[in-house]
Image (cartoon, rainbow, N blue to C red):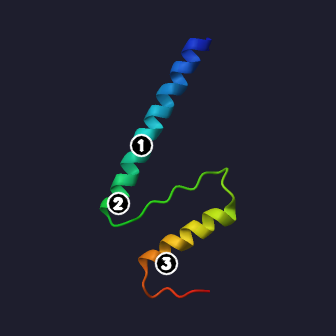
Amino acid sequence: MPGAMHREWWAEKMRRNIERDRDTDRRLADQGWQVEVVREHQYVTLAADEVERLVRSRNPLATDR
């Protein structure tokens, strides 16, 4: 695939992925879910801490460790 076509293909793929992800986030939110994006390069413990913080903030019955 020549350079320009390769760049165009990836740009379109990324655009579609972003569109799909936004649609998925919206559908989940419409059903009462809170979406938390965890990227593959994030430290697992930091991502887990953020998920725990979100769960505790939404659940008044959650107790501290």
* Quadrant assignment, res 46: bottom right
Distance between mark 1 and mark 2 Cα atoms: 14 Å
Disc 3 secondary structure class: helix
Q: Earlier in the sequence, mark 3 or mark 1?
A: 1
In the picture of the structure, the residue carrying the numbered disc 1 is 20
Amino acid type of the residue that numbered disc 1 sits on in the rendered structure? Arg
Discs 2/3, front:
3
Amino acid type of the residue that numbered disc 2 sits on in the rendered structure? Ala
Is residue 32 rendered to the left or right of residue 7? left
Is residue 30 rendered to the left or right of residue 16? left
Which residue is at 43% across, 81% downward? 59
Which percent across, then down, holds residue 12? 47, 27
Q: Which mark is residue 33?
A: none
Is residue 30 rendered to the left or right of residue 59? left
Which residue is at 39% across, 46% downward? 22
Disc 2 secondary structure class: helix
In the picture of the structure, the residue carrying the numbered disc 3 is 56
Distance between mark 3 and mark 1 Cα atoms: 29 Å
Q: Which mark is residue 29?
A: 2
Which percent across, then down, holds residue 64? 57, 86
Is residue 43 rendered to the left or right of residue 4? right
Relative height, residue 34 to residue 20 (above, below): below
Which percent across, then down, holds residue 23? 36, 47
Q: Are marks 1 and 2 in contact (CB under 8 Å)?
A: no
Amino acid type of the residue that numbered disc 3 sits on in the rendered structure? Arg
Q: Earlier in the sequence, mark 2 or mark 3?
A: 2
Q: Earlier in the sequence, mark 1 or mark 2?
A: 1
Q: Residue furthest left?
A: 30
